[in-house]
Image (cartoon, rainbow, N blue to C red):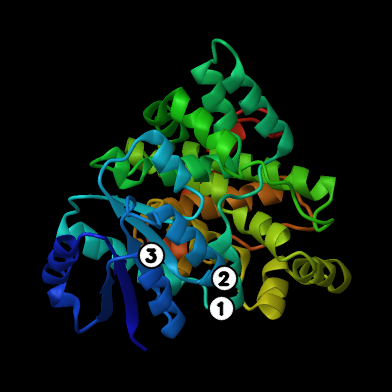
């Protein structure tokens, strides 16, 4: 099956340059080049495309307006902005319909890498219905109380950056969204950012205020899929896993980037449950009923009814948003580490054991219920390390309140 990419730019010279730079990929990708949004939509009506890459500033129909239409009419299409530096207002206008951002001039190897990765992300989720649902999401639902605290702080005359950072770090939705934006090429960073603290500092309060207040991070859970007890446990478990994974990585003398990645993977590892509960409604209610009535593991019920697990769904969305690959891998493989290609100590190991330990500490009917994969630990040179990691977690306190991050 061919991999199809549609490039849109009102400057013919730019399109010619893209054609030349990507000529070596013609054997792998079927590429089309058009000069307007209307022409792009016509081509997409005629045949499907996997990825659309568009300029931001175009006459008649802007890149943001084009991607809004693509999101509505062709939700499974991966949406990328390729544009020169734009003002803050323009960037934020494109946040909702855009999966990833690349800046002009874009290095050919970086463009190839991003597009190759985009095709790989599509392979994370086989269910086409779920692909369409997840691709339409702009943000995960946020816990209302946290959202209100952040917006209140941002509106104050002298907002506190440390307090905002702490609040954002406690919310998987806000964390995911700000990481999506700060890792875009508009910020011109040479490295990937996975720390909420770094992301908040990079964005600055003005951009953060506009981002939080202008996107749908505050979306509430639709219907009655999850009750208060389920939501409370999900947040407590996510925060605990983030903290445990971070401290486990610290105990292994991991570098700062690895520690940040482990924290973020732990915080986001169960975000697929939020996505499914919010986006799938009654279908996910069937999953939860199967767990309650038939005493099935949640993952088993998800695969039987939906054809995939919450881990795959979360990894797919985070992959669309361009989060670091190590974070995505930790999320995707947190209950099946043997599916990972990472070797040695990794975000996968840290997230897996952090989740398992907290589930052992705080049993709940909605948890994964996956045992520790000792064989995987042994294959990756970590045999017996689980006992040391348990001691690390014990030192954090046997009861996890979920109210503060250590």
Q: Residues within 10 Å of mark 2 (few under 14, many from 20)?
A: some
Residue nearest the observer in this picture, 347 or 18: 18
Task: Name the residue that disc number 1 marks.
Answer: 128
- State left or right for residue 163 relative to residue 70: right
Residue placed at 36% from the left, 72% from the top?
A: 39
Residue in view at x 20 percent, y 59 percent: 11
Vertically, is 252 above or below 106?
above
Q: Do the residues labelled 1 and 2 touch (CB within 8 Å)?
A: yes
Q: Is mark 2 on a helix, strand or loop?
A: helix
Q: How many marks?
A: 3
Which residue is depicted at the point 46% across and 69% down?
338
Q: In which quarter of the image is residue 367?
A: bottom right
Q: Report how far apart the C-alphas of labels 1 and 2 lie in the structure.
A: 6 Å
Q: Name the residue under label 3.
A: 37
Query: If the image is split into quadrants, where does the N terminus sit?
Result: bottom left
C-alpha distance separating marks 1 and 3: 25 Å
For marks 2 and 3, give the one nearer the viewer.
Answer: 3
Q: Categorize mark 1 by other alpha carbons within 10 Å: few (<14), some (14-19), many (20+).
A: few
Q: What element carries label 1?
A: helix
Q: Where is residue 88 in the image (x, y as percent from the top left)?
A: 39, 34
Q: Mark 2 points at which residue?
A: 132
């Amino acid at each position: 099956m061919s991999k199809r990419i549609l490039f849109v730019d009102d400057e013919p010279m730019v399109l010619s340059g893209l054609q030349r730079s990507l000529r070596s990929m013609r054997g792998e990708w079927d590429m089309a080049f058009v000069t307007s949004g209307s022409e792009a939509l016509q081509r997409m009506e005629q045949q499907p495309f996997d990825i659309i890459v568009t300029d931001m500033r175009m006459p008649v129909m802007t890149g943001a307006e084009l991607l809004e239409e693509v999101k509505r009419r062709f939700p499974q299409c991966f949406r990328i902005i390729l544009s020169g530096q734009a003002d803050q207002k323009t960037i934020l206008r494109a946040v909702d319909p855009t999966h990833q951002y690349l800046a002009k001039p874009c290095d050919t190897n970086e463009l190839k890498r991003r597009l190759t990765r985009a095709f790989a992300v599509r392979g994370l989720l086989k269910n086409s219905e779920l692909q369409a649902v997840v691709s339409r999401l702009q943000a995960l639902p946020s816990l209302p109380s946290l959202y209100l605290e952040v917006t209140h702080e941002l509106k104050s005359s002298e907002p506190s950056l440390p307090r905002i950072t702490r609040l954002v770090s406690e919310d998987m939705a806000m964390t995911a969204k700000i990481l999506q934006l700060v890792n875009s090429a508009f910020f011109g960073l040479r490295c990937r950012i996975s720390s909420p603290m770094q992301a908040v500092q990079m964005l600055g309060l003005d951009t953060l205020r506009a981002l939080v207040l202008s996107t749908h991070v505050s979306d509430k859970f639709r219907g009655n899929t999850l009750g208060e007890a389920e939501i409370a446990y999900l947040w407590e478990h996510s925060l605990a896993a983030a903290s445990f994974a971070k401290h486990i990585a610290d105990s292994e003398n991991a570098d700062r980037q690895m520690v940040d990645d482990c924290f973020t993977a732990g915080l986001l590892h169960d975000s697929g449950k939020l996505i499914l509960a919010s986006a799938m409604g009654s279908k996910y209610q069937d999953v939860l009923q199967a767990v309650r009535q038939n005493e099935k593991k949640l993952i088993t019920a998800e695969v039987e009814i939906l054809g995939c697990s919450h881990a795959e769904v979360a990894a797919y969305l985070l992959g669309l948003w361009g989060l670091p690959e190590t974070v995505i891998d930790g999320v995707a493989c947190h209950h099946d580490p043997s599916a990972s290609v990472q070797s040695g100590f990794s975000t996968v190991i840290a997230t897996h054991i952090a989740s398992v330990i907290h589930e052992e500490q705080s049993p709940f009917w909605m948890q994964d219920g996956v045992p520790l994969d000792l064989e995987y630990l042994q294959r990756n040179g970590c045999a017996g390390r689980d006992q040391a990691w348990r001691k690390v977690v014990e030192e954090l306190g046997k009861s996890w309140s979920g109210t503060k991050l250590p």
